[in-house]
Image (spheres, rainbow, N blue to C red):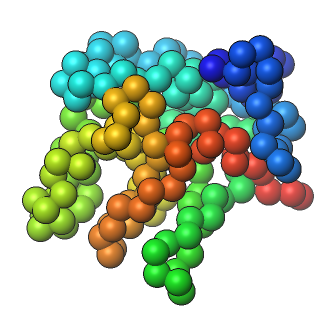
Amino acid sequence: MKLFTDNRKLSILHKGEELVAPDSKLSQISFAPLKSPLDRQVLYHLETSLGIRYPQLIIDFLEQCGGYEASTRYVYPSALGKAFKPIGVELRCPDRRWFFDLSCFQLPEPDPFATLSAALPPDFVQQNETLLRKLVPLAWDNGFLLCLDFSRNPGEPAIAFIDPKTPVIHPMFLNFIDFVLRIGYLEA
C-alpha cells in the first residue's frame, strides 16, 4: 500500500493499482502538506510502549495532507479551497446519527491513554482501560473522537468512533484505507 500525492492530489496505490471508492472525490482534492515531518521519536515511543507498528500510510497521510499546523498537537487538513464533507457515523442507537467533521487531526503523541482519560468519564476509563490503551486519537470534532484501534491487529488499525457523552466506543472502519476512501468535499 502506498499513499502519494501528485500535484497535491491524493492517490492510494495497492500492488500498482489505484484504489478508488465509488463516488470518490479524492482525485479532485488538492492537499497542503505539513511544514515539517512528524516526530519520529514520538512514533518510535508509541510503537515500543504500545507494542504496535504505526502504519506508514497514516504517517504519509498526516504529513502530505495535514495542511496547517495550529499547534504541536493538531493539524488542520487543507483541501485548498474546498471544505471536507463530514463522514456519517451510524451509532448503535437507531435514532442517533453523527456527522463527523474532518477539520482537526491530532498528531501522534507519547501518551495517547492520558489524552483519552482526560476526555472521558473516569468510570468509563476504568471499565475499558485495556481497550483504551490500544487506541490512538486521530481526529476530534467537538469532543467526539476518531481513534486508530490497534486492539485486534497491532500492525493494521481499524478506526473507532468514541462518543464521550454516552460514552461508547463504536467500530467505524475496518482500516485506514477504508476511512481515506470515504473522504469527500462539499459541493459549492
Q: Nearer the viewer, residue 141 or 22?
A: 22
Report the side of 77 relative to 151 (left or right).
Answer: right
Q: Position of residue 179 (x, y in %)?
A: 60, 44
Q: Residue at x 83, y 44 (%)?
A: 25
Q: Position of residue 46 (x, y in %)?
A: 27, 25
Can residue 22 be seen here? The reply is yes
Q: Position of residue 38 (x, y in %)?
A: 44, 19
Furthest-bottom residue in view? 95
Quadrant in the picture for the N terminus: top right
Can residue 34 be seen here? The reply is no
Report the side of 38 relative to 98 (left or right).
Answer: left
Q: Position of residue 73 (x, y in %)?
A: 38, 35
Q: Residue at x 13, y 62 (%)?
A: 127
Q: Residue at x 46, y 81 (%)?
A: 93
Q: Residue at x 83, y 48 (%)?
A: 22
Q: How many marks?
A: 0
Report the side of 104 relative to 21 (left or right).
Answer: left
Report the side of 2 relative to 122 (left or right).
Answer: right
Vertical relation: 31 (above or below) 121: above
Q: Nearer the viewer, residue 83 or 91?
A: 91
Vertical relation: 83 (above or below) 20: below
Q: Nearer the viewer, residue 9 or 180?
A: 180
Q: Nearer the viewer, residue 19 or 69?
A: 19
Vertical relation: 150 (above or below) 89: above
Asked where in the image residue 8 lies, by quadrant, the reply is: top right
Quadrant in the picture for the C terminus: bottom right
Asked where in the image residue 120 lies, by quadrant, the reply is: bottom left
